[in-house]
Image (cartoon, helix red, strand yellow):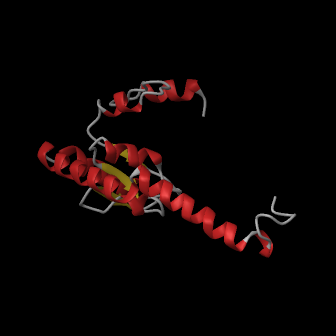
């Protein structure tokens, strides 16, 4: 994807390309929801950022996204590779009352705090490293030749 393509899309009705930024909190402060139509994901940082800032989301029902978003609770899920379903979910979000979006956003904040807080993520990573180090790669311990 080129900058020229992004700028061209920014010329479309109801679309604005803001350009690259390292200040996502400022971008997210300007929007009513986050939309992530993905074919596949790991754990999308963009959804964690949306939740952390109290924004509801519209996402495709793929692994990673469905682990963060509970349909109707903190966002809307739609079928992957289905433009009509995505359009309908986005339309539902657009016509949703601001108070309903705020309730979804608050739920998203709770989901992130309770399930994806920094401390939890660090603990999970350390636990994974400990499990691997006990097993070792190919049955070898960390102190044995051949770990890397």
For residue 19, above or below residue 116:
above
Q: Position of residue 101 (x, y in %)?
A: 19, 47
Query: Left or right: where does residue 98 sit relative to residue 138?
Result: left
Q: Position of residue 3 (x, y in %)?
A: 57, 25
Query: Left or right: where does residue 148 sit relative to residue 134?
Result: right
Q: Examine the image and state in which quarter residue 147 appears.
A: bottom right
Q: Position of residue 139 (x, y in %)?
A: 78, 75
User: Looking at the figure, which quarter contains the C terminus?
Assistant: bottom right
Q: Is residue 84 visible?
A: no
Q: Residue furthest front?
A: 143
Q: What's the residue at 15%, 50% (across, down)?
A: 100
> Of 2 and 57, which appears nearest the observer?
57
Q: What's the residue at 55%, 58% (across, down)?
A: 125
> Of 123 and 40, which appears nearest the observer?
123
> Of 51 and 125, which appears nearest the observer?
125
Please count the marks in the image: 0
Q: What's the residue at 36%, 32% (across, down)?
A: 25
Q: What's the residue at 29%, 34% (across, down)?
A: 31
> Of 69 and 143, which appears nearest the observer?
143
Q: Examine the image and state in which quarter residue 111 appears.
A: bottom left
Q: Is residue 104 visible?
A: yes
For residue 142, above or below residue 3:
below
User: Looking at the figure, which quarter contains the N terminus?
Assistant: top right
For residue 113, above or below residue 50:
below
Q: Examine the image and state in which quarter residue 32 appears.
A: top left
Query: Left or right: where does residue 105 sit relative to residue 7?
Result: left
Q: Residue furthest right?
A: 145
Q: Position of residue 88 (x, y in %)?
A: 30, 54
Query: Left or right: where does residue 44 sit relative to residue 33?
Result: right
């Amino acid at each position: 994807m080129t900058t020229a393509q992004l700028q061209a899309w920014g010329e479309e009705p109801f679309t604005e390309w803001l350009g690259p930024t390292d200040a996502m909190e400022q971008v997210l402060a300007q929007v009513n929801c986050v939309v992530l139509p993905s074919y596949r994901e790991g754990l999308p940082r963009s959804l964690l950022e949306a939740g952390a800032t109290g924004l509801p989301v519209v996402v495709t029902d793929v692994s990673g996204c469905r682990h963060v978003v509970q349909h109707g609770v903190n966002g809307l899920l739609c079928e992957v590779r289905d433009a009509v379903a995505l359009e309908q979910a986005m339309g539902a979000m657009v016509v949703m009352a601001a108070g309903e979006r705020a309730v979804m956003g608050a739920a998203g904040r709770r989901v992130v705090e309770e399930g994806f807080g920094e401390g939890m993520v660090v603990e999970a990573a350390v636990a994974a490293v400990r499990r691997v180090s006990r097993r070792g790669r190919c049955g070898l311990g960390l102190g044995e030749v051949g770990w890397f």
